[in-house]
Amino acid sequence: MEYVNSIILGIIEGITEFLPISSTGHLIIAEQWLGHRSDMFNIVIQAGAILAVTIIYWRRLVDLVLGWRDPRNRAYAAKLIVAFLITAVLGLIVKKLGFELPENATPIAWALIIGGVWMIFAEWAAARRPPHKEITWLVAILVGIAQVVAGVFPGTSRSGATIFVAMLAGTGNRAAATEFAFLVGIPTMYAASAYELLKTFKDGGAANENWTSLGIAFVVSTIVAFVAVKWLLSYIRSNRFTMFAIYRIILGAILLGMAATGVIA
């Protein structure tokens, strides 16, 4: 059953990491029934989903590296680096302050509902602006901050926060905002995974980790995320994110009801 649960958690992570519905929120809720997992487990399987995006965007990444002489590539890469550094610095500050993920559903439910309403507003506001693809320095800075906010408030959704901050800050094109959000997530999640791995080995917690279960969940999340991201990139070409906003609001309301009746913590 341990391995079956790891497969289920890998599927949940793969589906929810890049859809704007909050992977961390879904994993915390799933653990109510499937058993608690370490922070390292949750972050490393997120890295599996990031690996899927790395594979999908490998041509774009290679182009940014090899085409550094192009001023547009240099500017784009610099903005990715700035967004990542802001996230890294603020993320370390949050860690030093002793932030812990919530263990009950209520704050996650409210984050899902508030985020859903915010997504609907962001879509409406972005639709009233010219649909240009430019990633400005303001967008890069706000995306870096948004990643930390999403980490502090599970249920917010890292992808949702970064995509819609980019759209509200001036990148009215959904595809351009999504690409930047996904690309900046690559170094962010790899760094978070490496940090947790080093911390676990340093603290001697590696001996208590079920590495087989972690490996299974990692592989499953990679495969499922690859399919989910491919579908999402195709979907947003001609559709808004409204469907995901409605899902978030409904799920949040259901979770509040379940928490109020004692079905979940």
Image (spheres, rainbow, N blue to C red):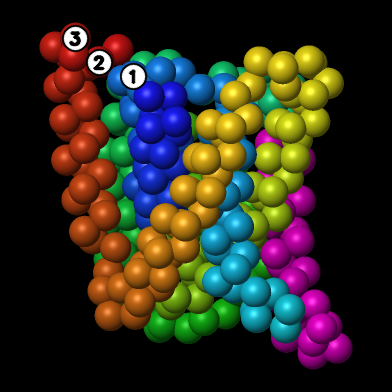
Q: Position of residue 163 (x, y in %)?
A: 46, 61
Three-letter amino acid code of the residue under disc 3: Gly
Q: Are marks 1 and 2 in contact (CB under 8 Å)?
A: yes
Q: Quadrant of the C terminus?
A: top left
Task: Give the spatial CA distance, label 1 vs label 3.
Answer: 12 Å
- Closer to the chain start, of discs 1 and 2, is 1
The single residue placed furthest to the bottom in the displayed view is 70
Does dot 1 land on a helix, a strand or a loop? helix
Task: Give the spatial CA distance, label 2 vs label 3.
Answer: 5 Å
Task: Give the spatial CA distance, label 1 vs label 2.
Answer: 7 Å
Does dot 3 land on a helix, a strand or a loop? loop
Any mark on residue 264, and which?
2
Q: Are marks 2 and 3 in contact (CB under 8 Å)?
A: yes
At x 26%, y 74%, the residue is 239
- Closer to the chain start, of discs 1 and 3, is 1
- Dot 1: within a 10 Å radius of its alpha carbon, few (fewer than 14), some, or many (20 or more) residues? some
Q: Position of residue 155 (x, y in %)?
A: 39, 36
Three-letter amino acid code of the residue under disc 1: Gln
Three-letter amino acid code of the residue under disc 2: Ile
At x 34%, y 28%, the residue is 30
Q: Is residue 235 magenta?
A: no
Among the 4 quarters of the image, the one containing residue 10:
top left
Magenta: main secondary structure: helix
Q: Is residue 70 magenta?
A: yes
Q: Is residue 117 visible?
A: no
At x 27%, y 69%, the residue is 240
Residue 107 in the image: above or below residue 116? above
Q: Which residues are magenta?
A: 64-92
Circle 3 is placed at which residue position?
262
Q: Position of residue 157 (x, y in %)?
A: 43, 45
Q: Position of residue 237 (x, y in %)?
A: 34, 80
Circle 1 is placed at which residue position?
32
